[in-house]
Structure formats: C-alpha cells, structure tokens
Image: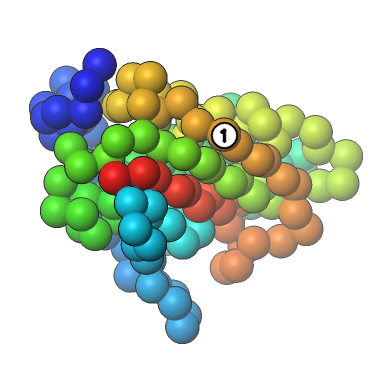
Amino acid sequence: MTNTNIAARLQTLGIELPPAAAPAAAYVMAASLGSTVFLSGHIAKRDGKPWVGKLGLDMNTADGKLAARGIAIDLLATLQAHLGSLDQVKRIVKVMGLVNSSSEYTEQHLVINGCSELLVEVFGDAGKHARSAFGVAQIPLGACVEIELIAEI
C-alpha cells in the first residue's frame, strides 16, 4: 500500500482523529529534523482524561492494548497537525512504549501491540517499525501507558 490518501484509509477503518494534544509541560508535541519527525510521548486517555491504572495490578493486558491503540490514534492526530497531511509519512520508523506495571507483570510487549497493529492497519508495510516496550514504576498523571513515535517524511 502506498501512503496516499491516508484520510480515506482512516475513514474505512472507522477512525476519526481527535484534535491534536497540547503539551503538558515545557516541550513541544512534535519536532522535525530533516526528513524525520519525533513525537513526544502521548499518554493513554479515556473520556478525555488520563487513563489511570497499573498493568498487573488493576488493569489487564486487553485493557492495556486498547489504551495503546487509543494512543496510536492520538499520535496520528499529532502527526497530521504537524505535517498538514498524513500522506507525507513515508514510514513509521520507531515506537517506544512505556507501560505502568507491577514488578511481576511481563506482557508489556503485548500491550504496545495495540499501537503497532493500528499503525500497520493504517500505513501497511510502511507502518512496520522498530520498537521497544518497557515496564515502568509510574507514568505522569498515573497513566497506564505512554508511547512516543519517530516517523520518516
């Protein structure tokens, strides 16, 4: 699949992008360097508020995966706001996911699949990316998941 008319692809998938998120502190949501765009970490939200929880304690992997999918949609909204059109994305290069989890929880990679799988649905082969998934003791505002992304334009 070529990356032309990503908006139509999103519509086919039933995805409507929300307004791009605003930074919560002293940073920008997107920064470009040459043909690379770096997106700041986006936290999981539910009903417009941080989706608070800890995987392995009060959240399960399926819920974490849904949270990561929601973050992917927010990341796309930020990319679109930064670029003007998602058709400019040549490929998704890297995704880094942080999962607020108990010390016993070991399915961080499955949680971040919620983001990775959506990116492939939207961009096809150009959505396949390198990735890291980490379990962390806490994420800002108590959010269950945070994900950042690097894209080539």
Taking 45 as reference, is 26 above or below it? below
Q: What element carries label 1?
A: strand
Q: In this view, does 111 lie to the left or right of 43?
A: right
Taking 92 as reference, is 12 above or below it? above
Q: Residue at x 81, y 37 (%)?
A: 105
Residue 102 on image: x %, y %: 81, 47
**Quadrant of the drawing holding the C terminus:** top left
Q: Nearer the viewer, residue 130 or 59?
A: 130
Crowdedness near tag 1: few (<14), some (14–19) or many (≥20) residues, C-alpha within 10 Å: few
Residue 89 occupies quadrant = top left
**Quadrant of the drawing holding the N terminus:** top left
Q: Residue at x 14, y 28 (%)?
A: 4
**Snapshot colouring:** rainbow
Q: Is residue 131 left or right of residue 90?
A: right
Which residue ends up furthest to the bottom in the rendered image?
26
**Residue bearing the label numbered 1:** 130
Residue 44 on image: x %, y %: 48, 51
Identify which amino acid the numbered label 1 is placed on.
Answer: Ala
Residue 130 appears in the picture as rendered:
yes
Residue 55 occupies quadrant = top right
Q: Is residue 43 left or right of residue 10?
A: right
Q: Nearer the viewer, residue 150 or 28?
A: 150
Q: Which residue is drawn at 53% across and 50% down?
A: 147
